[in-house]
Image (tube, rainbow, N blue to C red):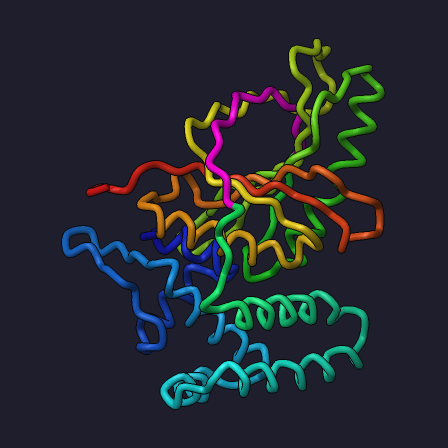
Amino acid sequence: MFSIGEFAGLGRVSVRMLRHYDAIGLLRPAHVDPHSGYRFYTAAQLRLLNRVTALKDLGFSLQQVQTLIDDKVDTAELWGMLRLRRAELAARMAQDTARLAQVDARLRMIESEGHMDTGDVVLKKIPATRVAMLYGTATSYDHPTSITENLTPLYPRLMDLLEQHKVPICAAPLAYYRPAPTEPGDETITVHAAFPIGDAEVPPGAGFEVVTLPSVDEAATALHHGSMAEAFRTGQKIANWIDDNGYRAVGPGFAVEVYLDCPPGEFDKWVTEMQVPIRTAPGN
């Protein structure tokens, strides 16, 4: 099972929204710890979360979503609704492009329900990696454009600094994320852009941080092909594999993203490895 924070990251929704769904009976946790009150969810509940999110994107109120869920709207009907919404979004201004990509991704996820292939999830040991790093902040997973807008500009800035100080890059760039709340209910996350630099010397005052990402004994990994706007699909595939194989996620619950092939401007051709540290779940 996954903590509420981990489940929110997998579904790309906020913890606050999951708590609200619980309060109104729309999506209740699979288990609530009787002592701590902590909520826990299963990967199987992503199916319902995908439907709720898709219906919200269609413009339905939560009360209407509850009615549609209770009426057991089938995949074909929901698929038709999403296709109609997609046509409407395509005619809007360019600022709606990010939302359109999210609706398309949810549609494909719903189409794959019941036959999601988790066979290409690979268990790996990840060695410690010394990286040069810059970071920024994003609002939350509720705002995917905030992640892109704050993460993407960091890479050319970091590359310029590395070239300026003659620090060689020794492997593919990567990104990782950490919760950074400043007050209760704040879901700000820190986005980290990094290049592996091995044992290269770095002069003082280079303008970036040098950190060593610790080794990971076991990580569930999978390749994501295409735009990062749809990366949550691969993340949910990994989540299903974790649950099916008796593991649970370790750490903040956000996958590390290693950008293996990133042709400029050709996002549909990107190849990204997603890595989730794991450990054996209690009782397995």
Q: Which of 112 and 71 is in front in this view?
A: 112
The answer to whether 69 is drawn above or below residue 276 in the figure is below
Give the residue at x 38% y 65%.
45
Left or right placement of residue 195 versus residue 45 in this view? right
Q: Nearer the viewer, residue 47 or 250?
A: 47
Residue 186 visible in the picture: yes
Magenta span: helix, strand or loop, mainly? strand
When the figure is inspected, residue 44 is found, relative to residue 170, above or below; the finding is below
Residue 46: image x %, image y %? 43, 64
Q: Residue furthest left?
A: 35
**x and y percent of residue 86 in the render?**
69, 79
Asked if 104 appears above or below 278 in the picture, the reply is: below
Examine the structure image and report whether residue 94 is included in the region drawn in magenta. no
Q: Quadrant of the C terminus?
A: top left
Residue occupying the point 66% across, 24% down: 196
Say which of 39 and 271 sits in front. 271
Q: Quadrant of residue 203?
A: top right
Residue depicted at x 55% and y 72%: 111
What residue lies at 35% left-to-right and 52% top-to-bottom? 244
Say if residue 180 shows up in the picture: no
Q: Residue 190, position in %: x, y?
A: 56, 42
Specify the segment rendered in magenta.
121-134
